[in-house]
Image: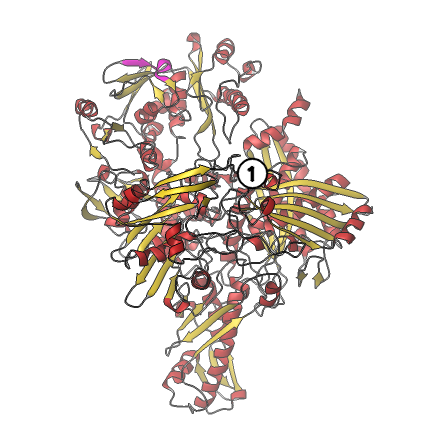
Amino acid sequence: MENFEYHRPSKLADAVKLIKAKKDGKLMSGGMTLIPTMKQGLATPSDIIDLGGLKNTGVKVTKTKVTIMAGTTHAEVANDKDLKKAIPALAALAGRIGDPHVRHCGTIGGSVANADPAADYPAALIALNAKVVTDSRTIEAEKFFKGLFETALRTNEIIKQIEFEIPARAAYSKFPNPASRYAMVGVFVADFGKKGVRVGVTGAKGSAYREKAMEKALSADFSADALAGVKVKADDMNSDIHGSAEYRAHLVGVMAKRAVAAAK
Amino acid sequence: MSETGIGARLVRKEDHRFITGKGRYTDDINLPGQAFAYFVRSPHAHAEIKKIDTKAAAKAPGVLCVLTGDDAAKDGVGGLICGWMIHSKDGSPMKAGPHPVLAQGKVRHVGDQVAVVVARTRDQAKAAAALVNVTYKPLDAVADPAKAQKRGAPKVHDVAANNTVFEWEIGNKDATEAAFSKAAHVTKLQLVNNRLAPNAMEPRAAIGSYDAGEDHFTLYTTSQNPHVARLVISAFIGIAPEHKLRVIAPDVGGGFGSKIFIYAEEVVCLWASKRAGGVPVKWVAERSESFLTDAHGRDHVTTAELATDANGKVTGLRVKTIANMGSYLSTFASSVPTYLYATLLSGQYNIPNIYAEVDAVYTNTTPVDAYRGAGRPEATYVVERLMETAARELGMDPAEFRRKNFITQFPHQTPVIMCYDAGDYGASLDKALELIDYAGFAKRKAAAAKKGKLRGIGFSNYIEACGIAPSAAVGSLGAGVGLWESAEVRVNPVGTVEILTGSHSHGQGHETTFAQLVSERLGISTEQVSIVHGDTDKVQFGMGTYGSRSGAVGMTAISKALDKIEAKAKKVAAHVMEASESDVEFKNGSFSVKGTDKKMAFGEVALAAYVAHKFPTSEVEPGLKEGAFHDPTNFTFPAGCHICELEVDAETGVTEVVDWVAVDDFGNIINPMIVEGQVHGGIAQGVGQALTEGVVYDDGGQLLTGSYMDYCMPRADNLPPLRLDFTKTECPSNPLGIKGCGEAGAIAAPAALMNALTDALGVKDVPMPASPQTVWKAMAHLREAAE
Amino acid sequence: MPAISMTVNGEKVCGEVEGRTLLVEFIRNTLGKTGTHVGCDTSQCGACVVHVNGKAVKSCTALAIACDGADVTTIEGIAKDGKLHPMQEAFRENHGLQCGFCTPGMIMSGIDIVKRKGKKLKEETIREELEGNICRCTGYHNIVKAIQAGAAKM
């Protein structure tokens, strides 16, 4: 891999200053995608600004909201006692990202900023009506994910925390790619009672999205059977050697049914 | 038996270094002043090389030299060879295209090596390699073996018209045609045996080191057969004569066939070391390079037909296979789809008429050669998929259909060369049926259906030919080498023993099992025995480890040398105990004189042999060291029955293997723990082939499965616990009665799994790997029926 | 080049690194501890697993410089006073290794599983938790057995 200068600021303001000052600087928060990408020569930053020094970690739970600091690792999210009570589905999702070693290093902020179309978190952000809070503003999840590895983040913007609404019940159902174990399809279903049901889907398209026909059906009747008549369109779905668009569309239906059945 | 002798479930002697991080693999070795090689590889599947500009790279920081195919030609570095000559039906020799160590004029697959940069550090070499400017003229490429022979397909090698390497046949065509014309029923299958990447966990690596003072080369390399590597690099590639080249294969992290072959990179490291003025040159493959350059396995397209009579007896088998050789003929590539494949097409069955045709073709893909099982998994897949399908078509129970056709008399000469020497196929079937509770299957299937799961059961009654191989026999079939093995037994004056063997251990546990043989024979503990292997300066010669041959051939060589040790020690003991040699007995590690209480421990006799005071050295030479070469008289024929039970998620197509029973007949077993481990690993690779693994190229020859992100290696959660048992018929062709166990699992497993899967789905065939998507597609008929 | 220091297997070590130097390169090349292996370039095989501040991580996907000041344990550091770690012993007793190349990562992962999931491990749990470790030799059967046995003795 090409060499770079390494920085490890301990304050957010310093991180912002550094990323603004460096021409081809790149932020790193865990590095679980960035390091392999640099090893393949697909990223050649002049500077790495490691956000690990910010110690921006932790999960806070109130009556209506869960706030996860950007530097919190997947393992920390998965094992947070309060989160397990507030949104068990979110803790469970974090516990199935990558493998145990990746979960010890990878962070929610890093994953969300990277916006891998096959990452798990985006489905949860979409379904739980999350807000991405950066050093300068707050962005709604639906407006945050723009496309393949593309977000609403400006070049030098840094995620501080992510805020999730607490649903009455929720579940995440994932169909892993057999080789990479990333989500080939992942469906996060969240029932907000009177406020309706939200369904976030990852892996299937260029970026995570809401499956609105399902939301409508489930808002009327939160049961797996209610999804029987909902047809998922394969039109703009991803297609690769492991899953055609048609197969992915089918899996969205199956995973949604399973998530509804498992929701708690 | 001594406590550490044959049959003991002994923990492995070699483990201590591996579990403490003290294993010594090639990349763990660093020679003083060593430089690093990085290869410039073709991004094109097929292209002419118009120009290679190395100027910028040569000037880059740390660079010692940049070498291309032209330099290799100038220096007289020879090309890589294929050591097994196959003749076509018309008698013409196979069409072997040139295989230079660095491409000359043309590249033929993605990853083909075009140039090498040697620099002080790995990063410098890699950075400079990016500066080598190669101008290519891309050509159309062909990757699919079924398309390679079609009119207008791009030509991979000038020597091979229609990309055909050979058109080979075996068996009796006319008799087979006659059998088919009289058949009551014919079962036909079109089968694809998917291409696999071997994926030993240790990537290939090499260090070449040239000593200008001695004009001598040393090569550290990840090899299963260092002597063969030395022979080829000396005699054919011409780097140095054998006495000027030492090849060391230290700890090797798995091979599965892929480290048998002589590759360009190790040759280039040697040559580059001389070009760089004697600086040792190290190369370690990145995993992405392993996918592009380690010889792949399998890749057959086959049409197979089985003829049966009105009584359900098999009367004929007809097979036509196209075998993909990739872009070059690798070291033993031509033997795999011919003599290692079609000679096993009789399976465990009495099939009076067999005829098989094999066309080997070039494509613009990575070369294909032996991979765990090599030909025999492909043969088993053909035979066992046919037997299962035929039973279903005839409305017979698949177990009983097999039983009806088993060979029961031995020796049995098949119509395809092999003469099976011993076996009891009914015994392994019976035991396997009992273990799996065959009678209870219907109940289990019904219970699974209630959970929305489709349950299936499938058999594989495999046979393989191992312990390769009688030299004269393989010579008559085209092998360029003999396939004997050598051993030397050095007894030290204190009675400890060193065994020098030409077999190479890269996970098989030879340091334990070979010591068990010595322990059994000499009555000493395995702690008093060391096994020396993998160094051409220490071991005089050897043919290496592949084809499940280390036990049957390698250990038999040791056994023969031990016979000589015993004979010599008896002479010494007789003199020391002042007895007639014929009165000396050797038992449980002690020499005694019949009818007296005179006794000497093995160690005492060893000491006496070296002290040499008590015998006339004019009659008996001092010392105690003997060697032997063993050439087997026949192949060995391990066989058995594997039964797979699986469940398919009807909604997603996910297949879960829920039970696996393997009953194998390996003859006598040296260490059951190690043998079980070999079976487990083999099954895992077979399950991988059936369920998860497959090398995929697009039509232009670009590799789509070039990393673990896309090539699906079986993980712990892809596999069930495995239930093993054994039956035994001793192998008559070696004194130890052993057959070999290294490949059985990989040979048996794919057919068992795919028979179970097609049973679950109620379809004739599903292509491998049966990924969730593939299975989901194969279930379309069930969805339609439901609608 | 920046200098870093860390504790490796209880010993203070230091060395110069580049920004890009991976933890595994520092361990293997600078410290000469070659028990930690590299089997892939996409962070999947797990042959490189070490413990950093008590947690299993892939040392091929960690920058050495980011581990400045960390407490690192490698396969060479788990046997104490000449006595093998129970997990090492269990791999030998249960034939949990063949070629040995994935073994250091497997053992380090096994210990980490016990730290997180306790000493009484179900077979399924072990199989799930080994998602990040690939073995080509054993079919995992005896690795699972070894981790189960090693856990019970830890």
The amino acid beneath tag 1 is Pro
Counting the numbered discs, the total is 1
Q: Measured from the top left, where is residue A190 in percent x and y?
A: 43, 16
The residue that appears at 44% across and 28% down in the rendered structure is A183
- Residue A44 occupies quadrant: top left
Colour setup of the view: secondary structure
Q: Residues within 10 Å of mark 1 (few under 14, many from 20)?
A: many
C115 over A68 or under it: above or below: below
Magenta extent: A138-145
- Residue B760 occupies quadrant: top right
Q: Measured from the top left, where is residue B226 in percent x and y?
A: 43, 61
Res. B500 in view: yes
In the image shown, does B89 or B757 lie closer to the viewer? B89
- Left/right of residue B753 with respect to residue B185 in the rendered view: left
- Residue A162 occupies quadrant: top left
In the image shown, does B212 or A196 lie closer to the viewer? B212
Check the picture and name the quadrant holding the N terminus of chain A: top left
- Mark 1 = which residue? B769
- Left/right of residue B299 with respect to residue B105 in the rendered view: right
Q: For mark 1, give the secondary structure.
A: loop
A236 over C70 or under it: above or below: above
Q: Is residue A143 magenta?
A: yes
Q: To which chain does the residue with label 1 belong?
A: B
